[in-house]
Image: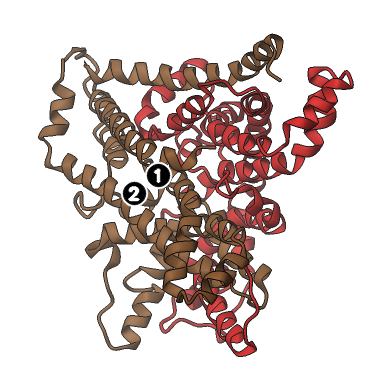
Chain colours: A brown, B red
Amino acid sequence: MSTQSSRLAARMMVAPSVVLLLIWMIVPLAMTLYYSFRFYRLLSPDRTGWTGFTNYVWFFDSPDFWLALFNTLALVGGVLVITVVLGILIALLIDQPVKGQGALRILVIAPFFVMPPVAASIWENLFMHPQNGLFSAIARGFGAQPILFLEQYPMWSVIGIVSWEWLPFATLILLTALQSLSSEQLEAAEMDGAGPFARFRHIILPHLTRAITVVILIQTIFLLGIFGEIFTTTQGGPGSASTTLPYMIFKQAIAAKDIGRAAAGGIIAVILANIVAYFLMRGLGRNLDA
Amino acid sequence: MARAHSPRRMWLTTAAAWFVALVIFFPVLWMILTSFKTEPSAVAMPPQFLSADWTLENYAEVWARSDYPRFFWNSVVIAVGSTVLGLAVAIPAAWAMAFVPGRKTKDLLMWMLSTKMMPAVAVMIPLYLIFQRLGLMDTRIGLVLVLMLMNLPIIIWMLYTYFKEIPGEILEAARMDGATLWGEIIHVLTPMALPGIASTMLLNIILAWNEAFWTIVLTTTRAAPLSAFIASFSAPQGLFYAKLSAASAMAILPILILGWFSQKQLVRGLTFGAVK
């Protein structure tokens, strides 16, 4: 059905999207690249000029940068592991014949509709707060000292909050995939004497590969840029304990008012995103094919 | 893959499933309960459930102290506007990629998706400067544009996976009957693709409603949506739990209700081609 004219028409239909996305990608990127080689501090407006790689070197020399890099990857990796593993377990549970499956789905999907600043402030104030939080009440009920979540385990707390936000997404995609699995296949395996674990390993898990791929792909895209949750809860602290790369860039731009450095950080973040994307596409692209 | 089980086992799994679902939902429930308590009751130790002092005062006060309708209306305009504009650009693109695929279609899709991997913070300053130069700062049209571009790859991908499920033979039959390209899109494809377009629309309204970086960075007052409204409320931490909860509930309830009413549509649309 692809005649010459329909091919031309198809190109013209794709063109607006491609052009818009190209502009959206290239213009800010080119500007960021330009600033990253400039001396540009809002607090010393008279001094301008090219500085070569100074802004980049500052990042690589800063111990905070390597911590931020580690934290960024820990956040992405941690949330992916938690949401995929729990998502599979919860999907397997809900997929069983249970009473009120529709109502269950409504409860499970709820965190997905909660905007990040609200999610972060619920967890920070109503749950993790050392005096008034529910967790501290529980700890005291057992006669224990309240855990200082955001002070002592800031990164784990952020990973926990973000996992709660993304768990519904993972669960629902995995559940939909699970529901498309034919019961005959499972029953046949059961008759052949395959136990629950063998059935999971050899039938259910392979069936879920594509769904898991999609969950990892979509979530990584959103997780690499996580910002609001950290901004609301720990502000990157204590010290730099929960500073991720996006947050470190934000601090350079807003607190230090050093546009040049922030821009260099932005370029580093873009390179990191491309490296992650490359491995993601290489590792997972196969699963997505047709 | 639902299978028949003994009644006892069904009650056990039902209990377990409900327990897990309630644990996941509990933070939202607790926030809503707190929003109806008086301030002393909200921070009382041990926490109060049934014995709490219930009140509607927090909602009245948040309503009186802030211009909630304006924030709400900005959220609606930005979420719906960016989604409609995005669909207008994405539908033709997804249609072409699904029905007239070239050798590079898959790569093109992946490239589009990869543009979303750039952290927003990385391009914050250029966008800020562009917005200032073009007079888009604190305008709804500016946010509509940014959120549209941000979510465009997701819209295109979702629509693409939907359109691909529509059998090509139907199109050929329509063409035999002399349908033009646009006639084909309007009379044959659109009705078949409507459920897919509806779920794409829903997901994008939710993503845009909940976006909380650009909506805060690029607005001050006039165009500020509910994400900025809530950000301004969480400043005096710990002191006003009940009012903070009421404001939070007011920020998320519209989209929570929309999401719950349309969750069947949404869930079906959320698969991104993960289910074949």
Is A80 above or below relative to A185?
above
**Numbered disc 2: what chain?**
A
Q: Are marks 2 and 1 on the same chain?
A: yes
Residue with the mark numbered 2: A76
For image coordinates 61% across by 38% down, the residue present is B161
Horizontally, residue A253 falls left or right of residue B225, namely: left
Q: Which sits earlier in the primary sequence, circle 2 or circle 1? A: 2
Quarter of the picture holding the N terminus of chain A: top right
Position of A249 compared to A88: left or right? left
Q: How far is mark 2 from mark 1, CA to CA?
A: 6 Å
User: Residue at point 64% right, 24% down?
Assistant: B89
Q: In this rendered view, identify the residue nearer to me: A107 or B135.
A: A107
Residue denoted by label 1: A220
Q: Please tell me how crowded label 2 is: few (under 14), some (14-19), or many (20+) other residues with Cα within 10 Å.
A: many
Q: Which residue type does callout 1 highlight?
A: Thr
Residue B137 at x, y percent in the picture:
51, 26
- Examine the image and state in which quarter residue A96 appears: bottom right
Using the image, name the chain to which the residue with label 1 belongs.
A
Above/below status of B257 relative to B107: below
Instruction: Evaluate if marks 2 and 1 touch, with contact meaning CB atoms under 8 Å apart.
Output: yes
Q: Secondary structure at mark 1?
A: helix
Front residue (pair A78, B163): B163
* Residue B237, visible in the rendered structure: no
* Helix, strand or loop under label 2: helix
Q: Taking B267 as reference, is A173 left or right?
A: left
Q: Quadrant of residue B148?
A: top right
Q: Quadrant of the C terminus of chain A?
A: top right
* Residue A90 in the figure: left or right of residue A155: right
Identified at 62% across, 15% down, the residue is A11
Q: Position of residue A17 (x, y in %)?
A: 58, 21
